[in-house]
Image: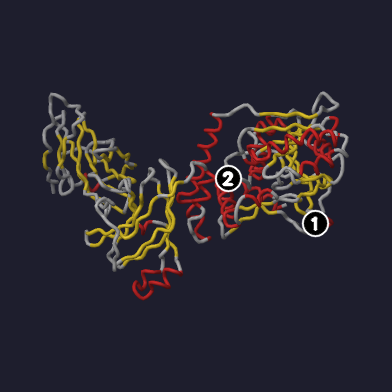
Amino acid sequence: MNTKTTVAPEPNKAKPATNTPVVLHDIRSQPVALPSKDSSKKVIIKLDEIEQNERQLHLSLWSTQSALQFCLATSSQAITCKASNVSRPDVEATLDRGSKQKVSGYHLAVELPYPLTEEFYLTFNVEGTLYAYKLPIKKTPGYDCTLAGLTLEGSTKSKAHIDLCGAIPGKVGGVSGWSIAKPGVTLWLVDTKGNKKDLSSCLRYHRDDVARIFSDEFSSQIIYGGFVTDWPFPQDLGDQIGVIEEDAGKFKLIALNPWSIVADDPVNYAKFSFSLATPAQDFNTRLNNWEGDVVNSLIFERNLENQRNERPASTWRFGNLASEKVKTSVIIPLYGRWDFVEHQLSAFAKDPAFKQEVEIVYVIDDPALINAFVNEAESLFKLYQVPFSIIWGHRNRGFSGANNLGVKHSHGETLILLNSDVFPRHPGWAEQLTQCLAENPDYGMIGAKLLFPDGSIQHCGMQFVYSESWSVWLNKHPLAGLDPTLDLARGVTEKPAITGACVAIKRSTYEQIDGLDEGYLIGDFEDSDLCLKVHAEGLKVGYLPSVVLTHLERQSFTLLGDVSYRTLVVRFNAWRHTKKWGKQIEQIMNKFESE
């Protein structure tokens, strides 16, 4: 049985290669023969199947023309099709018996944009002529609903409230609240510019307060009353966002809020965004779906802008070391408070190395500290006779940035990163760490034993533990809070990771791995990130139990806000750390667990 074909309209022969496509009216119900320069060869095409699943589109078609290139096009954009070739012996069997033409089958997969508001055409080129076929794509419901012309009113079929909405002008924002609707009713989040989202597509969760109030009126529709979502559409000052009810093609505005302005900075954005209510078990979903990428991009933009506007650091130097050559540089960032400096200098004064060949570099990372510390610095030097330098980089850089700046302005071949709330319990500790690195070239980093003020263990190496509830790797301190006698390590001991509160690393290694990663939010995981960079270079990470210091631990973090915000900062950093190093961490922990 022969396949019946229709003939496509003849293209303009004077201009075979034209940007104006020849529109094919039907290639679905029957094959269409296209004009060909070779009269002995028919170019036939047919679209067999169209499957649309929300934003996923799949097309199955065949043609006697091989190697066709397909593209989806609208009046405003072109969309690439992912094409795969399939054999079509079923079609070849139905062609004219005398025909020796081969048939090429094509399967096209397309990710459609959102919302679907335009007409979509399947386009392809045959012998210099562009052809187009209009596809029956289902448009996004409610795409024509806008805030314009609507006034706020009540509804018996739906209820909604926007609890919090904020945006960085011209960039990105977030919205949270609650909504419920009876069957057949669609609720849309719509902004002043006409951008919209179906509320059912947002991250939904149960809210007891909504369920309690509306259980009688809305029955089973109350289970997932809460919602939270990003808003990737740029907003301007004065713009608003509302909830519009769509019912049988009619629209009602049932909630309306002005945007709160969020400062264009990753920390300020995180403070706002993390305040959008989300159950703890769903926070990782937010990070994976949008929040992680938004915060990462804001951090990247901030760091790039800071690099463009970098100013030379201000430096103050008090005293000089007896040796002309600095052997070891101790880098100490200061944030939130500087009163620990005197306690450190008092301890350093009892160690001859700090007057001979170990330099101290204090990095001010908080503008509120400059006047008080710089004005007292000379008195502290005269009192303790320990030389030190002060570096101010004209902005808050965080743990990583402050240490990186300090390293840049230091001179030793060995670097010791030290927290401002860490105090030595014996002289010679810096020399021991330096010597240990020199004697063990297979180690890239070596840390110390840190004790709490009560004498219990704070740090004797770190390990990675996977949190099933958070779906991330976390840093844990084995033996924390226990008696130091329970630590059986003797001599330098390999560990999966060590804390950045006191760590020695060769300058050459530090520079080779580009120092500390400045892509984390505020604090956390920069030290283990550095350890993993060292592991990636094929070097070991070690711990020297004979070097003992006291660590008050996180005295500055109490200034960062409430516990819930701090917890979400940790979760973001853990998520980023796991995305970056998850596979390597698993390999490292498998190695240690097997030994």
Position of residue 359 in the picture relative to residue 11 (left or right): right
Determine crowd level at label 2: few under 14, some 14-19, many 20+ residues with C-alpha closer than 10 A. Answer: many
Q: Where is residue 551 in the image (x, y as percent from the top left)?
A: 76, 49
Q: Colour scheme in the image?
A: secondary structure
Q: Which mark is residue 164?
A: none
Residue that mark 1 sits on: 456
The residue drawn where x is 76% and y is 50% is: 460
**Please, what is the three-letter code of the amino acid marked with disc 2?**
Leu
**Please, what is the three-letter code of the amino acid marked with disc 1?**
Ser
Residue that mark 2 sits on: 521
Helix, strand, or loop for circle 2?
Answer: loop
Position of residue 224 in the picture relative to residue 155 (left or right): right
Q: Where is residue 536 in the image (x, y as percent from the top left)?
A: 64, 39
Whether residue 394 is visible, yes or no, is yes
The residue drawn where x is 18% and y is 39% is: 44
The residue drawn where x is 68% and y is 48% is: 556
From the viewer's side, name the closer residue of 485 and 361.
361
- Which of pointers 2 and 1 lies earlier in the amino acid sequence? 1
